[in-house]
Image (spheres, rainbow, N blue to C red):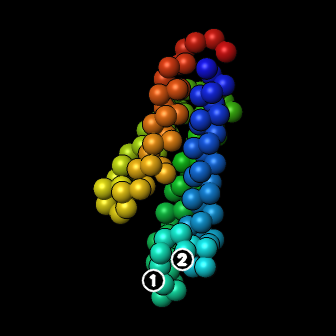
């Protein structure tokens, strides 16, 4: 079960690494415009905001990896909770599907981490 929890956390970290790349490096390119259904003008106007958002996603990924590598469940739980809150906020304020792409994987990982917290490896 601990392995499954670690894999789930790793998946969330990888997703956020992908969000970082998309928002920081591909936002104002065809890839970003296609993913977010934007015109070239829209992506150019919002590129700086997206890069900032991408940086925050990178911090979330780094925190999750730190928790995994250091085997600190409390750190992992904190960063998973941050992802869940960000995903819910994004779903309410920006696009409902963000709940499924961001919050739901983190909720699954959080449940698995909490279920295995304090248990031997």
Q: Does residue 38 appear anywhere in the picture?
A: yes
Q: Which residue sits at x=54%, y=55%?
A: 57
Q: Indicate the position of residue 90 as horizontal and vertical percent values.
A: 38, 56
Q: Is residue 75 left or right of residue 92?
A: right
Quadrant where the image shows the C terminus: top right
Q: Which residue sits at x=54%, y=48%?
A: 60
Q: Indicate the position of residue 35 as horizontal and vertical percent values.
A: 53, 69
Can you say whether 32 is above or below 107 in the image? below
Circle nearer the N terminus (1, 2): 2
Quadrant where the image shows the N terminus: top right
Q: Disc 2 marks which residue?
A: 33
Q: Which mark is residue 42?
A: 1
Q: Which residue sits at x=59%, y=51%?
A: 15
Q: Indicate the position of residue 103 as horizontal and vertical percent values.
A: 44, 45
The residue lying furthest to the top in this view is 120
**Is disc 1 in contact with disc 2, using a CB cutoff of under 8 Å?**
yes
């Amino acid at each position: 079960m601990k392995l499954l929890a670690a894999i789930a956390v790793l998946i969330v970290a990888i997703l956020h690494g992908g969000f970082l790349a998309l928002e920081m490096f591909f936002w104002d390119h065809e890839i970003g415009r296609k993913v977010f259904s934007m015109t070239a003008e829209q992506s150019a106007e919002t590129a700086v905001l997206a890069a900032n958002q991408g940086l925050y996603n990178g911090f979330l990924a780094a925190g999750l990896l730190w928790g995994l590598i250091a085997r600190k469940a409390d750190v992992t739980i904190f960063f998973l909770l941050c992802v869940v809150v960000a995903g819910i906020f994004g779903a309410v304020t920006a696009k409902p599907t963000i709940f499924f792409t961001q919050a739901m994987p983190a909720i699954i990982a959080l449940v698995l981490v909490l279920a295995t917290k304090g248990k031997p490896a």
